[in-house]
Amino acid sequence: MSYYFMVQNKKGEYIPLDITKSACFTRMSNSKGKNCTLNEIDVFTMMFFDENELREMLVKEGILPLEYAYKELSIRRLNKGKYIKVMYDFLYQKDIVYLMEPNRIINKINNKLQNNDFRFIEELTNHYYQYRDCSSTLPEVREYINTSIRLNQKDLRLNKRDEYGDNILQRMLKLLIYEYTQSRNGKVIYSNKVKYANLHGIIAFTNHYEKKYKNELESDDQLSLFKEVEKTKKKSKVIPGQLGFTDIIK
């Protein structure tokens, strides 16, 4: 499947950028022109610390025109004449470890479960609900997480282990990430080959959630500070000719 590194021209319209011209790009497939594999785009973006550094280099190398310097960048694939966005797209330097060792992202997500981050698991199961790869396991995870949210404590069924010693969430993630076969008795046999698009998606989904959660916390902190300032304004009594606290912070 062909993927394109694109910039938004105007609402609903996107222009492919030729990142193959970058000194940081490595061609690993038989794709030609601006067509790339998802893996090639990931290897390219993982050369950078974050999107700001990526944009700066693209402008410097003349790949991203100045008039588009702050326009939305995205990974898209061509489907029936339309460019469809890859959900939660770019990976950066910190994500290399997850591509090198996929079990690390599985463990990271499992740690969220152990820390009772039920909302993350809920959003994850909502996102992957239509995926056939994990259809044998995901509905159970979803049910147990909904119970955990309702009771505000982890449903003990989430600790249930399979023949590999994986809990049900780990099993769901392995079914998504690794190629596997299933024997007549129902035993799953995993291979070392990964389903790359799924692995990319799970890493990017986790990054997106954590960024969203961080922004929500910062917004809450700012709201709390604003409320404290408002309280101070109401309580402060300023002697004529004397500066009050609220005058200083303005």
Image (cartoon, grey):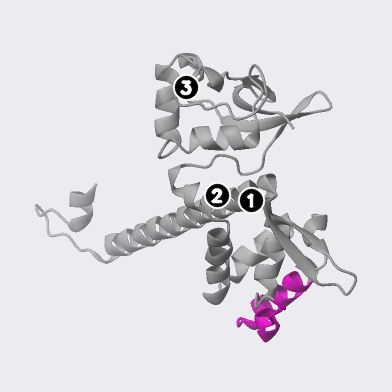
Q: Are marks 1 and 2 in contact (CB under 8 Å)?
A: yes
Q: Residue furthest left?
A: 241
Cβ atoms under marks 2 and 3 closer than 8 Å? no
Measured in 3D between alpha carbons, the distance from the residue under mark 3 to the one under mark 1, in whole angstroms, is: 29 Å
Residue that label 3 marks: 69
Closer to the chain start, of discs 3 and 1, is: 3
Q: Is residue 248 left or right of residue 69?
A: left
Q: Which residue is mark 2?
A: 99
Q: Position of residue 13 (x, y in %)?
A: 68, 21
Label 2 element class:
helix
Secondary structure at numbered mark 3: loop
- Mark 2 or 3, nearer chain start: 3
Q: Residues within 10 Å of mark 2 (few under 14, many from 20)?
A: some
Q: Quadrant of residue 37?
A: top right
Point out the frontmost of discs 2 and 3. 2
Q: Mark 1 sits on what residue?
A: 199
Q: Residue at x 83, y 56 (%)?
A: 132
Q: In the current view of this chain or complex, which residue is farthest to the bottom?
A: 156
